[in-house]
Image (cartoon, rainbow, N blue to C red):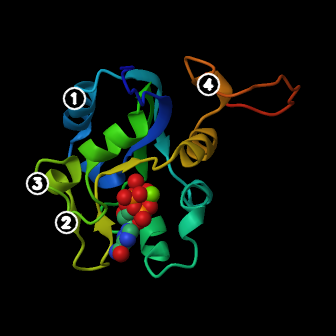
């Protein structure tokens, strides 16, 4: 009988959110994710402005928790950091397997062995689920999110079609 396989090579966007950065959890989180043996395709530390946060969570616009969520991601709430570490992972069923390790959205419902179960909390001030990590929830979301956070040249592998365009713009250089 033929073996039933359901292996998909997927890419997914992981964000270590401001609370993860401020709580010095970057190493722990990457270490836990590294046990999945996925390939890191991109990584960078980013200052998150309102525009980027709103594009990332555009799907949630209008929901009751939306403003609090944007404030959380841009460091306007308790943590006062707008630093986020963004990573792209690639591997077999990476989306589902990373979501498993990350745990449920509500840190109180997340299994205690998951990243959110271990490190997340619900802010008693804002009601926001400060859940330490973001992970894409579908291939469509992953593509949208990876393209929102990274330029093609920032990925170590080409995972989506690219094209060349001449762009003239001012850029910061070393003085
Ligand atoms: P994420 O997008 O950050 O990976 O989280 P998720 O898929 O598990 O959950 P999602 O429904 O996409 O919600 C995005 C983020 O919004 C905050 N949230 N707060 N207080 C609330 O009811 C509430 N619901 C969601 C969380 O920070 C969640 O990760
Ligand atoms: Mg989500």
- Label disc, if present, on residue 101 of the rendered structure: none
Q: Secondary structure at mark 3?
A: loop
Q: Give whichever of discs 1 and 4 has the lower sequence position.
A: 1
Ligand 1 located in image quadrant = bottom left
Circle 3 sits on which residue? 112
Q: x, y percentage for residue 111?
A: 15, 56
Relative to 163, residue 63 above or below: below
Q: Nearer the viewer, mark 1 or mark 4?
A: 4
Label 4 and label 3: CA atoms lie apart by 34 Å
- At mark 1, the secondary structure is helix
Q: Is residue 136 left or right of residue 25?
A: right
The span from disc 3 to disc 2 (Cα, nearest Å) is 9 Å
The residue at 57%/79% (across/down) is 62
Comparing 72 with 170, the one in front is 72
Q: CA distance from mark 1 to mark 4?
A: 24 Å
Give how far apart the Cα atoms at labels 2 and 1 are: 23 Å
The quadrant in which residue 127 appears is bottom left
Q: Nearer the viewer, residue 84 or 91?
A: 91
Height in image: 138 above or below 154?
below
Front residue (pair 167, 128): 128
> Quarter-wise, where is residue 81 in the image?
bottom left
Does label 2 or label 4 sit earlier along the sequence? 2
């Amino acid at each position: 009988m033929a073996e039933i396989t359901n292996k998909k090579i997927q890419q997914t966007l992981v964000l270590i959110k401001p609370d993860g950065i401020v709580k010095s959890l970057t190493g722990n989180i990457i270490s836990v994710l590294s046990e999945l043996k996925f390939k890191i395709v991109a990584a960078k530390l980013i200052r998150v402005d309102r525009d980027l946060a709103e594009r990332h969570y555009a799907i949630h616009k209008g929901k009751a928790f939306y403003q609090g969520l944007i404030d959380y991601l841009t460091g306007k709430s308790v943590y006062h950091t707008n630093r986020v570490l963004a990573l792209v992972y690639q591997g077999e069923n990476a989306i589902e397997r990373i979501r498993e390790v990350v745990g449920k959205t509500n840190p109180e419902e997340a299994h205690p062995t998951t990243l959110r179960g271990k490190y997340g909390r619900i802010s008693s001030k804002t009601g926001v689920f400060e859940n330490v990590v973001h992970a894409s929830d579908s291939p469509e979301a992953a593509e949208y999110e990876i393209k929102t956070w990274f330029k093609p040249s920032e990925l170590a592998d080409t995972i989506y079609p690219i094209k060349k365009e001449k762009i003239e713009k001012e850029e910061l250089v070393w003085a």
